[in-house]
Amino acid sequence: MKRLSLRIEVFLLVFIVGVLPAMLITSGVLSLYASRSVRSDVTNITNEATLLANQIVTSGYLSDTTQESMNTRFMSIGNAYDGRVMVIDANLKVVKDTYGADEGRTIVWSSVLNSLSGVSGSYYDQENSCITVTVPITTYTEEDEQEVVGVLLLTKSTDYITQNTIFFKDVVLEIMLIIGVASSVLGIIMARRFTEPLHRISKSIEDVQNGVVDEVSVKDFSETREISKKFNGFANQMRAVDDSRQEFVSNVSHELKTPLTSMKVLADSLNGMEDAPVELYKEFMQDIGNEIDRETKIINDLLSLVKLDKSGAALNISPVNVNDLMEVLLKRLKPIAEKQKVELVLESFRPVTAEVDEVKFSLAIMNLVENGIKYNEEGGYVHVSVNSDHQYLFIRVKDSGMGIPEDSLEHIFDRFYRVDKSHSREIGGTGLGLAITKNCILMHHGEIKVHSILGQGTTFDVRVPLSYIEKEA
């Protein structure tokens, strides 16, 4: 379902908040007015009827209904109430009716019957707009006992309530119209006030994308300041990623092109020689073979890195005896260490089993140990230790090699970054090994840290959870 724009929603919200409470309050006030008016009238009529009932008894009106003074009073009260006064005797016979319609008749109304039992009553007939009140006419017998000798019935028109309600409604309608207009104007102003910063953010983002400006800066509200700040941070990250991508492409092109250039030079040299010695041919072909091997290693490392970079790259997790795995890896690297005359030492503090992808984890540790051997001095050492606690596996690879300059430590995990490019090229380094290592460790939700002193050696500390837990995407 298509959503309304924020501007329209803010306008509707302000309009409803302005108009709806006014409507509810008006409805409540009118209802309260009507109910209070009825209650007030019932009280006043009941008091008036009680006084009139006492006068009927004291004047002996039930015995002589021709009394001019009482009849005049009945007519006066009826006219004042725009209603009716009825005097009913104990036999339910109407002895006086200011309307003259029911005199001499017998009426059996529930309110009259209740009052004959000594109970006053009232009824509001909203449909006919009138209030009816009945009170008992009581006297005292010779035994001083109260006796009901009749019922006095008074009615009062409530047309004034209806008329006043209609008047109030007309007034309220005018007020509601004013409130509606004011709410509409306020809604438009508030909608524009709240949405304008968002439109400016959208325009600024478009300008950033088109290169017109470098950052978004909308500071109308704390929320827009925060959005601007977060977007600028994200944009800077994207720029860094784009710069890194371009640098990566440039480095890949350079690294792949260099061996090809060397092979082309060697081949052209051979082709340009007439009757070149066999030994020279062999030397040049050996150099071409070395360049092919170097090209192959770069391509293989690139393929490994691409596989690791893929989102959701699959891990084949299984419980692995880390102590045994380290022995196998060091045994595999021992010939390289012996050739470099570097001592390779493994120290296990306790038996450790961890849930890892054996192939990828082995690749990470192999790269660290192999670097420690290759970038070492003759007679140096590479010390590998395995330890754990109740939660993590710890592997330390410490060497006595040439070390890493302090300003290079934060870049050594970057792709194609090499501390000593000439030395790396001599030993066949591609500048991708540590990038591959870090990716492998991160895939296991672990971390890797490096500490190095130039000329004294380097230490890599790897920490990986013993139990692999798949993180939600």
Image (tube, helix red, strand yellow):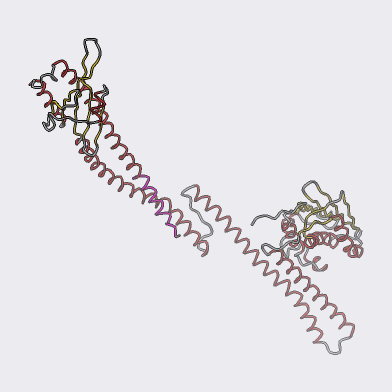
Q: In this rendering, would 459 be left or right of 38? A: right
Where on the picture, by quarter, is residue 151? top left
Residue 276 coordinates in the image, percent (x, y): 86, 87
**With respect to residue 282, does 76 lie above or below?**
above
User: In which quadrant of the rendered image does the N terminus lie?
Assistant: bottom left
Magenta span dominant secondary structure: helix
Q: Is residue 357 left or right of residue 75?
A: right
In the image, residue 225 sits, relative to residue 86, either above or below, namely below
Residue furthest to the bottom: 274
In the displayed structure image, the side of residue 274 where residue 222 appears, left or right: left
Query: With respect to residue 293, does 117 lie above or below?
Result: above
Tell me, yes or no, whether the highlighted magenta stretch contains residue 298: no
Q: Which of the 4 image quadrants contains residue 247?
A: bottom right
Per the rendered image, the range of residues in magenta is 2-19
Residue 340 position, x and y percent, is 90, 63
Residue at image position (92%, 62%) is 341
Residue at position x 52%, y 53% in the image: 228
**x, y (%) of residue 220?**
46, 49
Q: If the image is split into quadrants, where does the C terminus sit? A: bottom right
User: Is residue 28 or residue 379 the one in the foreground?
Assistant: 28
- State the residue in front, 426 or 38: 38
Q: Nearer the viewer, residue 121 or 312?
A: 121
Image check: 206 left or right of 45?
right
Is residue 7 within the magenta segment?
yes
Residue 35 location, x and y as percent?
Answer: 28, 33
